[in-house]
Image: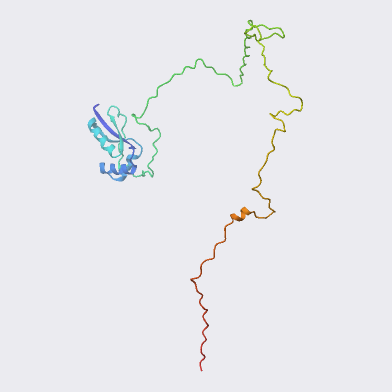
Amino acid sequence: MGDNRHSVYFEGSIADGFSIGQVKKNLAKLFKADAERISRLFSGERVALKKDIDLATAKKYHAVLANAGALVTIVAASDAATIEVEMPPAAQQKEKEEPKYSWTLAPVGSLLLKATEKVKQAVVNIDISHLSLASVFTTEKKKAAEAAPAPDVSHLSVAPVGEQLVQSSNSETVELTLDLSALTVDPVGAELGSGSRAEIEELQLDLSGYELLELGEESSVTRTLQTPAPEPPDVSHLTLLPEPEPEIENAAG
């Protein structure tokens, strides 16, 4: 087998948007196989669907199977030297039952990720040389707080007791003089009004338009404001009909 030959392997993986039942039906149509033989493809083991083909043919198989919902892997002949798992014959697989669910358990030691799905993690080196481990019983002594330096008061001085601390900008004090010649002081008890009590005229109230009524009595104004009684209706065009006399039945003779 040359290095330019390839093989197509299937491990039971299906594409997104497909159900396992739908993929089984599609593969049954492609391989023209019965349901029992197709179910053995989903055992979780790597099965060679096509071996010793060129790369172009392998890609065609890959595209057709992908449209059917089956995800396959193309492996070069040089990389598949240890892969010899073939589709087991029907006589050896009669004891195997079809999985009841769409999920199956892979055998112990199986590779869950494909070679194309593996991501190489970069190694990160963290420098911890400056770190050290201390016992949980070790208590670190707290450093005494350093006293704050005293403020510089060399430029300050203390004035004698009673000395004026605020200096006026003017050397001479200006005295405020008030002119009170227009004001006089009245004797104790004098009225501070503008005129004497004799000059004040008595307040005269005009009460001619008011009258004093007894309790419950109506005034003339109230009587004039009362609504007059309505006039009796005109019944001159109406007549009274006489009451009908009762009918007396004639006794039979």
Q: Is residue 178 above or below residue 69?
A: above
Q: Residue 51's x, y, as percent?
A: 26, 33
State the residue at coordinates (63%, 54%).
220
53 left or right of 204? left
Q: Residue 66's x, y, as percent?
A: 28, 37
Residue 14 visible, this orientation = no
112 left or right of 166? left
State the residue at coordinates (33%, 42%).
39
Q: Residue 85's x, y, as percent?
A: 31, 35
Give whichever of 249, 173 is nearer the camera: 173
Q: Quadrant of residue 192?
A: top right
Give whichever of 84, 213 is nearer the camera: 213
47 left or right of 140? left
Among all residues in the image, which is located at the extreme top? 154
Q: Is residue 68 above or below residue 233?
A: above
Q: Quadrant of residue 223?
A: bottom right
Q: Quadrant of residue 149?
A: top right
Q: Is residue 5 above or below residue 238?
A: above
Q: Residue 214's x, y, as percent?
A: 70, 53
